Image: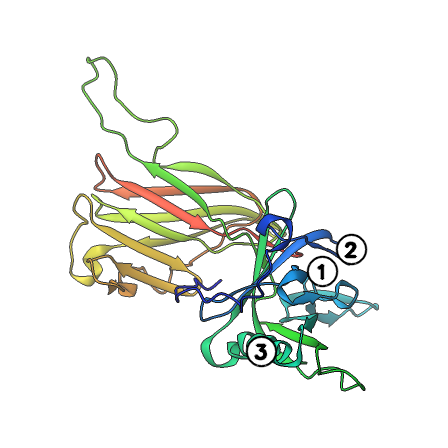
Amino acid sequence: MPIIAAPVVTPPDTGQPPEGGGGGGGIVLPELGRATVTYYDPAGGVWPLTQRSLGWATLAEGVSGLGAVPYELTTDPRARGGATLRHVQAQPRQIVWPLQVRGDNHMQFIERWRALATAFTRTLRDGPGVLEIARPDGSRRQISVYYQEGWEGRGAYGSGWIVDTAVMTLWCEDPYWIDPDPVVVHREQGASSSFYTPYPTVSSSQVLGATTITVPGDVTVWPTWTITGPASQVTFSVTRTTRSGSVTESFTLNPSAVGHGALLPGEQVTVRTDPPQVRYLDGSPDGVNWVGALNWPAATLWGLDPGDNDVNFTLAGSGPGSAVDLSFYPRYETA
């Protein structure tokens, strides 16, 4: 999901306060219930889509594409009939979103119509926008969208003067919805002391080694790892049960492989699993490319499945302050 870093551009001023004290009245979406919807364009513009007082509103009866992800199934025929499922591939999602635009006069309508058209179509030039659906309990889910087609108006007699409706199709390269609030897990080695004073000191809730990481949501997530020195080598592994039995996947970060030597206290490296990226954080904006520090070709940058995951961190050359942090965004089939 993109991070909107551009200056926030607010929609045109209507001279009217937002409904519900600024929180938006919300709409009832088919099969999903009441929700408040906001669109964030790639330039940082924030466009509430469920506040009629702004001069535009979603027509809930035409909304579609918010349900389960479409999949393509690859199968092999069986000799005695039927087929065996060989592979499942999630397909891009299409969301149909009808939006009615109004104005008190023709020029006010045109201003709003043009501004909204630009907010959606600029995704084809500037990168994806974000569609966010918020629930009454405060939970939110987001998806990255590109404008595909539909900002054309009804073309009926009388439309296009002070009111018209566009029925947009928004294309989503990643079909899954995400929680915009990341889950962050921290594990740190505690400082040890002499056995006689009186025991070794290790934090029971923040120890390196075997741990269980619980992933909410419906879909595999791809975490970003941050390793903080001291450490001379770090191995990350996960063991999961498949149809063919227990399988362990792992990757190892070795700073010496790129000529750096062991990480000193406080030095940090990030490993992103999707898309693959390894960066030594030297203070520059992008860091230094350390992809060669992984144990290719044996390295597998694995994801975390929904539910409990048995994960193990093995740090060689660790000491007080050695830490591993991981963060990920839960992913969902539906809005």
Q: Earlier in the sequence, mark 2 or mark 1?
A: 2
- Total number of numbered labels? 3
Contact, CB < 8 Å: mark 2 with mark 3? no
- Residue 292, given in percent of the width and then of the height, sits at 27, 65
Badge 3, how many Cα within 10 Å: few under 14, some, many 20+? few
- Residue 220, given in percent of the width and then of the height, sits at 55, 54
Badge 1, how many Cα within 10 Å: few under 14, some, many 20+? some
Q: Earlier in the sequence, mark 2 or mark 3?
A: 2
State the residue in front, 123 or 335. 123
Q: Is label 3 or label 1 in front? A: 3
Residue appearing at x 79%, y 70% in the figure: 79
Residue type beneath disc 3: Glu
Badge 2, how many Cα within 10 Å: few under 14, some, many 20+? few
The quadrant of the image that shows the C terminus is: bottom right
Q: Which residue is mark 1?
A: 67
Residue type beneath disc 2: Glu
Q: Which residue is mark 2?
A: 31
State the residue in front, 9 or 42. 9
Report which quarter residue 76 is drawn in: bottom right
Q: Is label 2 or label 3 in front? A: 3
Kindly state the secondary structure of the residue where label 1 is placed: loop
Contact, CB < 8 Å: mark 2 with mark 1? yes
Left or right? Give the position of 331 relative to 186. Answer: right
- Residue 1, given in percent of the width and then of the height, sits at 49, 62
Left or right? Give the position of 190 relative to 260. Answer: right
C-alpha separation, residue under disc 2 versus residue under disc 1: 9 Å
Q: Which residue is mark 3?
A: 111
Residue appearing at x 24%, y 57% in the figure: 281
C-alpha separation, residue under disc 3 versus residue under disc 1: 33 Å
